[in-house]
């Protein structure tokens, strides 16, 4: 199953997504890791950012189509379902 | 209100500066996350689903107007404009940045607040009856005792690394509003046959994965012996509590495995030891000094007057105003449960508005409750209309305290990293379903409590109707529990059966409530009817129509 890789930025806690050796704040821009090998490689590469104390809590999660499979990751990607004005879903 | 002495002030200042230094080291890369995590947890800082979360302690739920203003300032300056009152009377911010937390703690320290003892395996912030010092049924204000326990436990080296977190509650009234029997340790102020005031000490209560009702290990502990007795309890726990298994480490598991008789004997043995050593008495002067901080305001000599019964004010008075110990005064609950709102959330404008109201009416303090509301403890009855008008303008006059829409609800999957399911949207839908005020009053006292996982921060085990969110293969389901109670008639709710889907749970709750209204006898609350009839009829009705719908 395709996956994405996420973490929190250390300095402010912002949720991040892995994109080709870098991080983005946007779930949509996060890289789809289509194979288990690609996912493992991304997770391994991300440890460099952990070691450099830039991010914390890296982990992979599964996708269903383009969206996260689990409700938890949907909420993390967009913001609290009860506060559409907050989190990444908020119109800036 | 308790005021910091020089020692307290220096202590909090030092802790803030120590944490600033640790944050700097973390950001410079001198500490990794494993090394830093214990420091941040000791200062109430978690990493949650979206961001960091800072839990600020509100000792025994008491706040002053300047403190409310500071909480508003922090919400505005460092967060996203609001805070959340928790079931342990604390306030949480959901979006602080790590780099700002030292400044937040420094700001808090200017109003004698902090985030110490809100996390980790220590004696947590002590909670108390939110009607303390005001309730008509009170023997003595529980907060001086809570403060003595706070001072004793804050720096106690033996208790900084307990097998697990340790929660203490204190109440001084006949009616238990502090959920005493669901705390690791609880102190109930009692009067003996000779008219002397002392303490009944309960241990081993708790919620979470394995809920237990606490039992008494001391029936009447004399006032000067309080700390010696508590230390005896903690020693038994420290020596015998399990450190090998996080799920078995709470004192409730030890209390169950030893049984009441053995636990009592061990505590008493330790207590005698401590007494023999001749230490740990709380001298009368020290108690008097602390009690003086909590002295009630000088109540005017007034008489009780008939309270308003008409219109919106009358409806608010009927549910949100309670009897005060002093004639002519009342206790007013500010509901943080507007229909369709997020239970327990309060905006910076509301925090400021309440602080202004307190200044204008001369109220020195306000309370947070474990039911996630605010309480003005000393309101002149003649001021009720004016206070109500101000609260209405602030959106804090929802007339539902103690009614079915006054739902206790944890943050759940909308914020919490540990959650299995969302809880807030379900609470909102239930509140919307029962929004009709006449219907709420007709239903009467009914406490719905809801948690987004088995950790039970939303106290679902003690809800008359409890709801637990579970995850079934990635889909949110909701289990119903009936018959729980957190008061003196403590009970753990009975699980009804398989969970309901997100779109079914509100209907199931409604069918249960409607059946109660149909079957109740005069004067019965939901809990009474449930206790008389048992689970069967409620279970049948809850699942029945769901089955029909499926065919
Ligand atoms: S009960 Fe579970 S979901 Fe709710 S706040 Fe506690 S840990 Fe989070």
Image (cartoon, coloured by chain):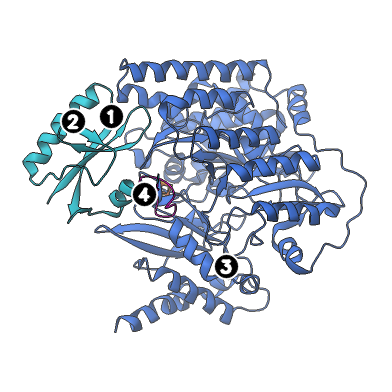
Chain colours: A cyan, B blue
Please report whichever mark, 2 or 4, sits nearer to the chain's N-terminal start: 2
At x 70% / y 58%, what residue is drawn?
Answer: B320
Instruction: Note whether B16 is above or below B133 in the view shown.
Output: above
Q: Mark 2 near mark 1, Cβ–Cβ under 8 Å?
A: yes
In the rendered structure, find residue A89 and report the number of the disc placed on it: 4
Q: CA distance from mark 2 to mark 1?
A: 9 Å
Name the magenta segment's main secondary structure: loop
| B448 with respect to B283 (left or right) | left
The percent coordinates of residue B444 (x first, y second) are 64, 69
At x 66% / y 46%, what residue is drawn?
Answer: B130
Q: Chain of mark 4?
A: A
Please rate how many residues cluster around mark 1, counting C-alpha atoms within 10 Å: few if below 14, some from 14 to 19, many from 20: many
Q: Which residue has dot 1 on it?
A: A55
Please report whichever mark, 1 or 4, sits nearer to the chain's N-terminal start: 1
Q: Quadrant of the C terminus of chain B?
A: bottom left
Asked whether mark 1 lies closer than 8 Å to ligand 1, one says no
Q: Secondary structure at mark 2?
A: helix
Q: Which residues are magenta?
A: A79-91
In the rendered structure, find residue A46 and report the number of the disc placed on it: 2
Q: Which residue has dot 3 on it?
A: B527
Q: Mark 4 near mark 3, Cβ–Cβ under 8 Å?
A: no
The percent coordinates of residue B209 (x first, y second) are 39, 50
Which residue is nearer to you in this view: B435 or B490?
Answer: B435
Q: Secondary structure at mark 1?
A: strand
| B235 with respect to B50 (left or right) | right
Labels 3 and 1 in the same subunit: no
Q: Decide whether residue B328 is among the magenta residues.
A: no
Q: CA distance from mark 2 to mark 4?
A: 25 Å
Please rate how many residues cluster around mark 4, counting C-alpha atoms within 10 Å: few if below 14, some from 14 to 19, many from 20: some
Mark 2 vs mark 4: give the one in front. Answer: 4
At x 64% / y 35%, what residue is drawn?
Answer: B69
Q: Quadrant of the N terminus of chain B?
A: top right
């Amino acid at each position: 199953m395709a996956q994405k890789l996420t973490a929190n930025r250390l300095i402010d806690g912002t949720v991040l997504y892995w994109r080709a050796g870098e991080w983005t704040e946007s779930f949509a821009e996060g890289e789809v890791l289509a194979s288990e090998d690609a996912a493992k490689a991304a997770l391994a590469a991300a440890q460099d950012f952990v070691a450099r104390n830039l991010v914390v809590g890296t982990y992979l999660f599964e996708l269903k189509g383009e969206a996260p499979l689990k409700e938890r990751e949907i909420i993390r990607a967009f913001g609290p379902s009860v506060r559409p004005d907050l989190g990444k879903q908020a119109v800036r | 209100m308790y005021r910091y002495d020089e020692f307290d002030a220096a202590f909090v200042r030092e802790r803030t500066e120590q944490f600033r230094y640790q944050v700097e080291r973390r950001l410079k890369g001198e500490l990794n996350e494993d090394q830093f995590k214990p420091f941040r947890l000791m200062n109430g800082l978690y990493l949650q689903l979206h961001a960091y979360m800072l839990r600020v302690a509100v000792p025994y739920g008491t706040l002053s107007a300047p403190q409310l203003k500071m909480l508003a300032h922090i919400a505005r300056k460092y967060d996203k404009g609001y805070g959340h009152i928790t079931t342990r009377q604390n306030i949480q911010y959901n979006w602080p940045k790590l780099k700002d937390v030292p400044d937040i703690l420094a700001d808090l320290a200017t109003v004698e607040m902090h985030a110490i003892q809100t996390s980790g395996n220590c004696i947590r912030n002590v909670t108390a009856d939110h009607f303390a010092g005001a309730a008509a049924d009170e023997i003595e204000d529980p907060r001086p005792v809570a403060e003595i326990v706070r001072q004793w436990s804050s720096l106690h080296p033996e208790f900084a690394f307990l097998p697990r977190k340790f929660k203490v509650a204190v109440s001084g009234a006949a009616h238990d509003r502090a959920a005493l029997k669901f705390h690791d340790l609880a102190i109930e102020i009692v009067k003996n046959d000779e008219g002397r005031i002392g303490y009944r000490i309960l241990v081993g209560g708790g919620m979470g994965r394995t809920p237990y009702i606490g039992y008494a290990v001391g029936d009447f502990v004399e006032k000067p012996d309080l700390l010696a007795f508590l230390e005896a309890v903690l020693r038994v726990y420290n020596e015998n509590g399990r450190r090998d298994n996080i799920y078995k480490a709470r004192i409730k598991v030890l209390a169950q495995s030893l049984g009441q008789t053995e636990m009592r004997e061990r505590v008493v043995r330790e207590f005698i030891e401590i007494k023999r050593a001749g230490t740990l008495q709380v001298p009368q002067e020290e108690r008097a000094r602390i009690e003086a901080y909590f002295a009630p305001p000088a109540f005017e000599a007034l008489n009780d007057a008939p309270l308003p019964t008409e219109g919106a004010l009358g409806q608010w008075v009927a549910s949100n105003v309670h009897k005060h110990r002093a004639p002519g005064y009342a206790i007013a609950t500010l509901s943080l449960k507007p229909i369709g709102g997020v239970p327990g959330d309060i905006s910076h404008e509301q925090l400021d508005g309440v602080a202004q109201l307190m200044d204008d009416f001369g109220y020195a303090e306000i309370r947070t409750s474990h039911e996630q509301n605010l309480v003005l403890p000393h309101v002149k009855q003649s001021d009720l209309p004016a206070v109500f008008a101000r609260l209405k303008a602030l959106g804090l006059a929802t007339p539902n305290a103690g009614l079915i829409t006054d739902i206790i609800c944890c943050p759940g999957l909308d914020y919490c990293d540990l959650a299995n399911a969302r809880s807030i949207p379900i609470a909102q839908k239930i509140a919307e379903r029962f929004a009709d005020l006449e219907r709420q009053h007709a239903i009467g006292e009914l406490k719905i409590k809801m948690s987004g996982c088995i950790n039970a921060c939303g106290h679902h085990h003690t809800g008359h109707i409890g709801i637990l969110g579970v995850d079934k293969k990635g889909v949110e389901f909701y289990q119903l529990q009936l018959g729980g109670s957190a008061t003196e008639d403590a009970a753990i709710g009975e699980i009804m059966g398989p969970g309901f889907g997100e779109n079914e749970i509100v209907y199931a709750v409604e069918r249960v409530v409607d059946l109660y209204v149909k079957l109740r006898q005069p004067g019965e609350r939901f809990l009474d009817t449930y206790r008389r009839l048992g689970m069967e009829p409620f279970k049948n009705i809850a699942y029945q129509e769901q089955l029909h719908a499926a065919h």
